[in-house]
């Protein structure tokens, strides 16, 4: 995947994950399916943050 598509994909995933969480806590969406979506959204955010930390940690070590 090219770098431009990877960036666009990350932005779309983050916006959808954050909006799902906000809509759930604003009680716009409810039920077991909404709860599953929130769980998946939190998982997406955790994976994204772990990837950022991994890149930062190992890029810093590679530059030393």
Image: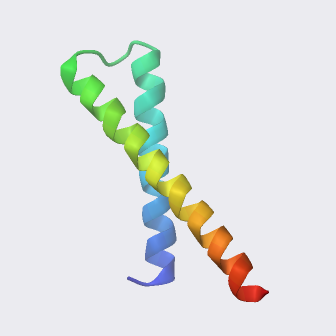
Which residue is farthest left?
A: 32
Q: Quadrant of residue 37?
A: top left
* Foreground residue among 59 and 16: 59
Q: Quadrant of residue 35?
A: top left
| Residue drawn at 49 percent across, 38 percent down | 18
**50 left or right of 60?**
left
Where residue 31 appears, as percent x and y from the top left, is 23, 15
* Foreground residue among 9 and 42: 42
| Residue drawn at 67 percent across, 69 percent down | 56
Where residue 39 appears, as percent x and y from the top left, is 33, 33
* Foreground residue among 26 and 32: 32
Where residue 29 appears, as percent x and y from the top left, is 32, 19
Q: How is the image coloured?
A: rainbow
**11 left or right of 37?**
right
Which residue is farthest right?
A: 64
Query: Can you say whether 29 is above or below 41 in the image?
Result: above
**Quarter placement of the C terminus:** bottom right
**43 left or right of 48?**
left
**Quarter placement of the N terminus:** bottom left
| Residue drawn at 39 percent across, 44 percent down | 43
| Residue drawn at 44 percent across, 75 percent down | 5
Where residue 28 appears, as percent x and y from the top left, is 37, 16
Query: Can you say whether 20 is above or below 45 in the image?
Result: above
């Amino acid at each position: 995947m090219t770098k431009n598509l990877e960036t666009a994909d990350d932005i779309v995933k983050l916006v959808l994950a954050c909006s799902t969480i906000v809509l759930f806590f604003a009680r716009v969406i409810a039920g077991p399916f909404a709860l599953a979506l929130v769980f998946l959204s939190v998982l997406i955010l955790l994976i994204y943050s772990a990837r950022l930390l991994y890149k930062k940690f190992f890029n810093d070590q590679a530059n030393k």
